[in-house]
Image (cartoon, helix red, strand yellow):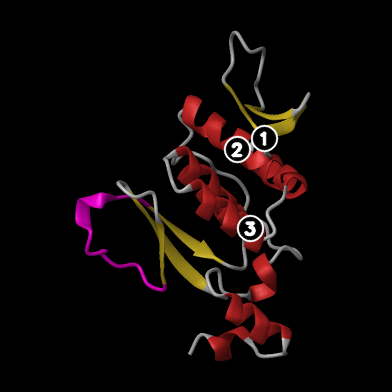
């Protein structure tokens, strides 16, 4: 299983991946960090939702979402475990908490994608750092064990190499 730490740089919005938990040279410029295990999708969803809500570079967030195959449909599995809801509302996606009453009384997030809607909900409902749920594994390994940041690793896996051999 491939474990990564992602750090969010406060000024640039860059998501900085490292293989180990360490103090990054930029000190107070780092405003958040997430430990990601490529075997579990739940934490990956949390990171993308929170990072986007905290101002991470949107292009990079969506690049990772595409690489990890985190689609609008996959968001349904995430929200079931997180106690949230996401659904189409006309041309947009809407995200709410399970106890949603109406737009006047309950926070909601909207966006062009489920990820954007969940990110807006995390921001307006103050859910950053508070999204919890059951991590799920099943057949949902991100990129079937591939490294998060290197497409080359994905290619090697497709050629039959084992993840533990690639990481060395």
The stretch in magenta equals 19-32
Q: CA distance from mark 2 to mark 3?
A: 17 Å
Against 148, residue 128 (above or below) is above
Q: CA distance from mark 2 to mark 1?
A: 6 Å
Classed neighbour count for the residue bearing mark 2: other residues with Cα under 10 Å, few (<14), some (14–19), many (≥20): many
User: Residue at image x 44%, y 41%?
Assistant: 129
| Residue 125 shows up from this direction | no
Quickly name the residue at label 3.
Answer: 41
Classed neighbour count for the residue bearing mark 1: other residues with Cα under 10 Å, few (<14), some (14–19), many (≥20): few
The answer to whether mark 2 and mark 1 are in CB contact below 8 A is yes
The answer to whether mark 2 and mark 3 are in CB contact below 8 A is no
Please state which of residues 84 and 117 is positioned toward the viewer in this rendering.
Answer: 117
Quickly name the residue at label 1.
Answer: 112
- Residue 80 occupies quadrant: top right
Percent position (x, y) of residue 163? 60, 84
Q: SS at mark 2?
A: helix
Q: Say whether residue 64 is magenta.
A: no
- Residue 19 occupies quadrant: bottom left
Q: Nearer the viewer, mark 2 or mark 1?
A: 1
Sooner in the amino-acid sequence: mark 3 or mark 1: 3
Against 136, residue 126 (above or below) is above
Percent position (x, y) of residue 78? 67, 46
Q: Say whether residue 24 is magenta.
A: yes
Please state which of residues 166 and 138 is positioned toward the viewer in this rendering.
Answer: 166
Sooner in the amino-acid sequence: mark 2 or mark 3: 3
Q: CA distance from mark 3 to mark 1?
A: 21 Å
User: Residue at image x 38%, y 49%?
Assistant: 13
Quickly name the residue at label 2.
Answer: 116
């Amino acid at each position: 299983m491939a474990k990564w730490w992602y750090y969010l740089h406060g000024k640039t919005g860059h998501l900085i991946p490292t293989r180990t938990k360490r103090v990054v040279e930029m000190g107070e410029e780092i405003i958040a960090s997430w430990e990601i295990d490529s075997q579990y999708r739940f934490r990956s969803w949390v990171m993308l939702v929170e990072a986007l809500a905290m101002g991470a570079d949107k292009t990079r967030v969506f690049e990772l979402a595409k690489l990890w195959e985190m689609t609008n449909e996959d968001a349904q599995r995430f929200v079931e475990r997180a106690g949230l809801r996401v659904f189409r509302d006309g041309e947009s996606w809407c995200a709410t908490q399970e106890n949603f009453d109406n737009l006047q009384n309950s926070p909601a997030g909207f966006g062009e994608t489920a990820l954007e809607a969940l990110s807006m909900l995390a921001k307006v409902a103050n859910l950053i750092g508070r999204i919890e749920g059951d991590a799920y594994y099943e057949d949902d390994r991100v990129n079937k064990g591939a490294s998060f940041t290197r497409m080359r690793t994905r290619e090697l896996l497709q050629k039959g190499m084992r993840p533990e051999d690639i990481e060395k």
